[in-house]
Amino acid sequence: MEYPDNLKYSVEHEWLATDGTVGITAFAVEQIGDIVFVELPAIGSMVEASKPFGVIESVKAVSELFAPASGKVIAINESLADAPETVASDPYGAGWLVKIELTKPDEVHALRDSTAYQAMIAAS
Amino acid sequence: MLKTALLDRHVALGARMVPFAGWEMPVQYTGLVEEHIAVRTAAGLFDLSHMGELYLEGPDAGRALDFALVTAPGKMAVGKAHYSMICAADGSVMDDLIVYRLAELRYLVVANASNAGVVADALRERIVDFDVTLDDASMRTSLVAIQGPKAAEILQAHINVDLTTVKYYSGVEAIACGVPVLLARTGYTGEDGFELFTAWDDAGVVWDTLMTAGAGHGLIPAGLGSRDTLRLEAGMPLYGQELDRATTPFEAGLGRVVKFDKPGDFVGRAALEAARETPRKVLVGLRLTGRGIARTGYPVYLPGATDAAGIVTSGTSSPTLGMAIAMAYLPVGHNALGTEVEVGIRTQRVAAEVIAMPFYRRST
């Protein structure tokens, strides 16, 4: 599985790009299984680090999405309403979830880099 | 945690193992949807060794079961099977069962894993005045199911009976994959298929043989995850969701199973006769017309109402139909086909419509 070096990773298996884009990792995709529904917050709403901001559903179950950092939602991936499976097929590209404007940029230091994240999931 | 005889095989296949009714069971191997579609289009192989197998034998076996269950096993022909339920004296459902008449005086009752102990205890209590013995063989019996349109073709090469002579809901002793089995043409998927009861350690050779034989036909191992979505599409109830101790067979739409015309009393008869006239709720099929997936426990509202009128018992995104389906209990009188309701999904209300069950019916 792939974990791009230019992203930061949370313990809840979300990634954060330097421009504030958020998605879920390849590990999360594998754990969730066949993705059939994604529910995202409204543009303009506030999210808080490590708190739920939406849900992602497989055929089997509902999983919460946790924000990797605090901020204001400035964009959501509207295409997932009709094509939620994109999250699984391209988790770091077309399957992005939301874009946030960070309100506490220092929180990024609490996130893991690719190497540390891979070590974490290898140990889990 | 209890382990089936096939546990090592599941782990070697990369299955995700989960606790289920005290057993360590495979929930999926390659993926729930892939397994679901394989069963609908080719075949899937299931380990169901967690199920409870109870043998009743003796001169009164038929009469004892007629008294203990809501069906009439005493009238069933040898070699046949039927769907049954064991109810409490108050008419509520303790478990749903398959009953096989293996011989004139010998029956097999198959119970859900989660209720196997409850059913064994209740049967023991109910048969004390009858000349019959009960043998709980659950921990000596494995169960492998092969389900799907290719099941018969795959199995036929490895069994000593002509499968065209084995009718739906019948059971016959046979030799399969070199070991003795009770072969039943039953299942919980909405497809044609077979269940093979074996001695505990014989499950391995049955599993290995059918895995190899089926590979060229599209057979893959299938877990409890796909078993759940397959049975839901087929409109089959699951104990603990559609059926429980707060539900009568009539409320679950299974009143036809209760045989009031059988001779003698049976446990629950008086309560069930009353319950037939006074259902408190009714099980319906729902299709979500708005966006979202209804899940177990979500409230169901009549349009515009503040208080919930019912509750979702099972729900998923149907892999075969490509839409969100659910089963739910609604108040009597609000269950007509086409009735519009709303499902409470987190903070929203999502429109849904009462539709006919089963959601899926195989074409042949």
Image (cartoon, rainbow, N blue to C red):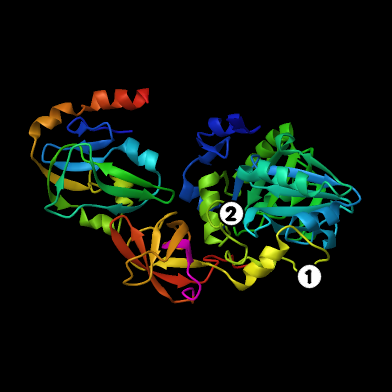
Front residue of A121/B38: it is: A121
Quadrant containing the C terminus of chain B is: bottom right
Mark 2, Cα crowd under 10 Å, few <14 / some 14-19 / many 20+, is some
Residue that carries the numbered disc 2 in the rendered image: B245
Picture quadrant of residue A103 = top left
Position of A14 relative to B357 (above/below): above
> Which chain is disc 2 placed on?
B
Picture quadrant of residue B204 = top right
Rendering coords of residue B142 (x, y %):
70, 38
What SS does tag 2 mark?
A: loop
Position of B263 relative to B123 (above/below): below
Highlighted magenta segment, given as a residue range:
B323-335
For the question of whether residue B75 can be seen, the reply is yes
Left or right: A120 with respect to A33?
left
Picture quadrant of residue B255 = bottom right
Q: Is residue B187 magenta?
A: no
Q: Amino acid at mark 1?
A: Asp
Residue that carries the numbered disc 1 in the rendered image: B261
Quadrant containing the N terminus of chain B is: top right
What SS does tag 1 mark?
A: loop
For the question of whether residue B318 can be seen, the reply is no
Rendering coords of residue A1 (x, y %):
33, 33
Left or right: A102 with respect to B354?
left
> What residue lies at 14% left-to-right and 31% top-to-bottom?
A108
Q: Amino acid at mark 2?
A: Arg
Rendering coords of residue A123 (x, y %):
36, 22
Position of B330 relative to A44 (above/below): below
Number of numbered tags placed on the structure image: 2
Q: Is residue B329 magenta?
A: yes
Front residue of B357/A36: it is: B357
